Amino acid sequence: MINYKIMTDNGKENKMVKKVFITGANKGIGKQIARQMGKNGWMVLVGARNEERGLTAVRELLEENIKAEYLNIDLQD
C-alpha cells in the first residue's frame, strides 16, 4: 500500500491519497479484493499480465465509481 501527499497548484492543500496495488485484480479473488478496497476509499492499481483483461477490470471498477488504473505486471523472463 502506498500513501503520499498531493499538493495543489497554489501549494496550500495537502491531501493523502491511499493506493493499493493488487496483483491478479482482473479476475477472481483479486478482483473482489480490488472492489472492496475501492469501495473503502482506496485507489486500486490493477495488476495483470493480460492488458485487455486488466483494462476491462479497470473499466468495470470505474463504472462502480472506484478509482482504478491498470499496471502490466508480466514478470516472466
Image (spheres, rainbow, N blue to C red):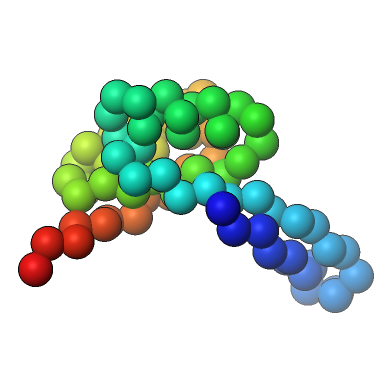
* Left or right of 71, for residue 63: right
Residues 47 and 64: in front is 47
The picture places residue 37, in percent across and down from the top left corner, at 56, 33
Residues 16 and 56: in front is 16
Query: For the point 46% across and 33% down, which residue is it?
Result: 34
* Left or right of 7, for residue 24: left
Query: For the point 68% across and 54% down, which residue is it?
Result: 17
Residue 77 in view of the camera: yes
Relative height, residue 74 to residue 25 (above, below): below
Residue 55 in view of the camera: no
Q: Quadrant of residue 65?
A: top right
Query: For the point 27% across and 56% down, which residue is it?
Result: 72
The picture places residue 9, in percent across and down from the top left corner, at 78, 73
Query: For the point 53% across and 48% down, which residue is it?
Result: 20
The picture places residue 22, in percent across and down from the top left corner, at 41, 44
Relative height, residue 7 to residue 56 (above, below): below
* Left or right of 10, for residue 17: left
Question: Is the C terminus in the top left, top right, bottom left or bottom right quadrant?
Answer: bottom left
